[in-house]
Amino acid sequence: MAQAHWGCCPWLVLLCALGAWGHPKSVDLKAEDVRNCLISPPYLPVTVVNTTAQLTALRQQMHIQNLFAYIIPETDAHMSEYIGTRDKRRAWMTGFTGSAGTAVVTMGKAGLWTDSRYWTQAERQMDCNWELHKEVDTASIVVWLLTEVPAGKRVGFDPFLFSIGSWESYNMALMNSNIKLVSITPNLVDQAWGSEKPLVLSQPIYVLQEAFTGNTWQKKVSDIRSQMQKHPKAPTAVLLSALDETAWLFNLRGSDIPYNPFFYSYTLLTDSSIRLFVNRSCLNSETLKYLNSSCTGSMCVQVEDYSQVRHNVQAYASGNVKIWIGTSYTTYGLYEVIPKEKLIEDTYSPVMVTKAVKNSKEQALLRASHVRDAVAVIRYLVWLEKNVPKGTVDEFSGAELLNKFRGKEQFSSGPSFETISASGLNAALAHYSPTKELHRKLSSDEMYLLDSGGQYWDGTTDITRTVHWGTPSAFQKEAYTRVLIGNIDLSRLVFPANTSGRMMEVFARRALWDVGLNYGHGTGHGIGNFLCVHEWPVGFQYNNIPMAKGMFTSIEPGYYQDGEFGIRLEDVALVVEAKTKYPGSYLTFEVVSLVPYDRNLIDVSLLSPEQLQYLNHYYQTIREKVGPELQQRQLLEEFEWLQQHTEPLSAKAPHTAPLASLLAVSSLAILGCRV
């Protein structure tokens, strides 16, 4: 997730951030580098981290390994979107805590490559040991290496932190140079970190109750083995590296990774055995019994030590075998020990593709989680309408309150990602998230973008709503309505089965393109059943698999006016069969997110009759599914808000006044005052 960008006078902004003068405010993100390393002593913000000791320790390890340079990506051994504290090696080495970026250390220099979301943050956190490179591609890192590394020297990397694709990119770029790319284990940053590195906590791995799973793990294993038997290349094993693959396969969950209910693990599933590589101390006797770990048959899980996966895979690969992998999540650390003639490579493993299609039980579970999630979001929106005009709400405190509302919902297991709670110009940063130190107050005069989600035992949620409690400008209303049109047009689209999402995402952009507007992020992503909030391989990008019945995807067009405001409207939708005039295999989407859009921002005159009909039908669905839940819990104020905000829209319908105003009018009427 992106962070805020700060600019203008460095010390003034910094003092505000530290609380010297009231609440911090966001300013121009196009800032100069706030560091000045050319004077003596250098000028540095007080927020920088002194990394001299870290670099000295790492270079000692590099010297032992005869390396001139070492590459440090921001990832873990499973290519996870979110990583645990123990895997934040780049952050420890550089002081920079942003979620994206690659560090490279030579014997004399150190550089960090990251994208524009993090430039200012990196400048405020890194000392003068580091050069900031405002690029992210491998090619720019290679150009720097070719300049800084003498001929004949070696560049090292941890193969467990390189995807196969990353290794191929570096290897191809350096192949014709006189510089050698070297796979080194164990990790040299870990060696330098030493005893200060966070310990691996033995968090319990637990069984997800049968009520929240689509099938037993035995049924899932049998299904994958059946796919192996039908495969034309006759694989004898499937190697699973992504954490959600093993969690899904065995119906197990854990808490090793922020926002995701996962545990560090690998699986080697063969035609006659099952090997689970995990920290055994995290499995209690009940879980071991559940896995049939005490037997040795083909449906018994052999629990192996997590650290032994490379050795075991290498030993298995020495036989007459064929190992099926998904290259997107398999690291070079495992790839390099399997002879290439014994590999069967697909972009995604059969487990990744299989879990993307939810069966009827899983669909029902996800639908149910979205009803309860809607209750939490509606409670928050009602609370905001009453409290934002008082000037007492900020981005961070608001996000915390929403987390509390979600936490009160049945089967809640925390947020599914860091809440994007962005007011005014901060919302123009598509993935900005506030912190306790850096945030803005919410105002009735500005737009507010809320992108949030929850983890529940029966599903994962992700929803974005943008609201304005005051008087939006004509341009803001038009932009919002065109984003809404894009959401509607894609949601109601009918398309042939097996159509690529990439071919249809233009429908989400067309209304914006018509007037010269656009957005710079993806249009949607898959979502899991108490798994990843961004679940591959479903979505609308070029490397997503074709849409199929039973898949869930987000639909999230947006628009961002730099330095002013941002708009995004995101719903989760299920791919279902479409009813067409003529027979055929056609699909469409059923939206399962159930929170109304902001009527204050909708210009109804821009909607076609078909779009208006769709919107009113959606509002009726919200009433039918969420209304009874609110009434049952005696959330009567929220129920009244829902009724008002789902009134059918027409070309002449006035917008609904904010709830706070309605309550004030009602109170004055009761007191006998004229309004």
Image (spheres, rainbow, N blue to C red):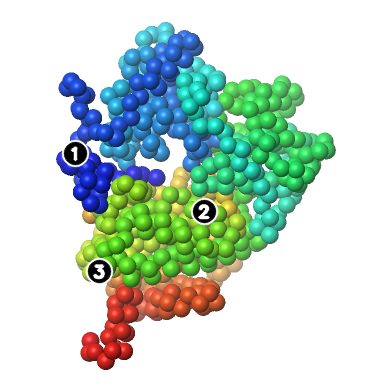
Judged from this view, the residue extending furthest toward the top is 152
On screen, residue 86 above or below 314: below
Give the structural element (helix, strand or loop) at label 3. loop
Q: Are marks 3 and 1 in contact (CB under 8 Å)?
A: no
Residue at point 18%, 20% (across, down): 40
Q: In the figure, residue 151 lies in which quadrant?
A: top left
Q: Nearer the viewer, residue 162 or 75?
A: 75
Q: Position of residue 28 (x, y in %)?
A: 21, 45
Q: Nearer the viewer, residue 178 or 568?
A: 568
Q: In the figure, residue 511 lies in which quadrant?
A: bottom left
Q: Which residue is mark 3?
A: 470
Q: Position of residue 621 (x, y in %)?
A: 50, 74
Q: Which numbered tag is attached to residue 188?
A: none
**Split into 4 quadrants, where in the image is the C terminus?**
bottom left
Q: Which numbered tag is attached to residue 414?
A: 2
User: What amino acid does circle 1 point to?
Assistant: Trp
Label 2: few (<14), some (14–19) or many (≥20) C-alpha neighbours in 10 Å: some
On screen, residue 537 above or below 265: below
Residue at point 30%, 38% (across, down): 121
Instruction: Between label 2 and label 1, give the one nearer the viewer.
Output: 1
Label 3: few (<14), some (14–19) or many (≥20) C-alpha neighbours in 10 Å: some
Of label 3 and label 1, which has the lower sequence position?
1
Q: Which residue is mark 1?
A: 11
Separation of residues labelled 3 and 2 (CA atoms): 32 Å
Q: Position of residue 508 (x, y in %)?
A: 39, 58
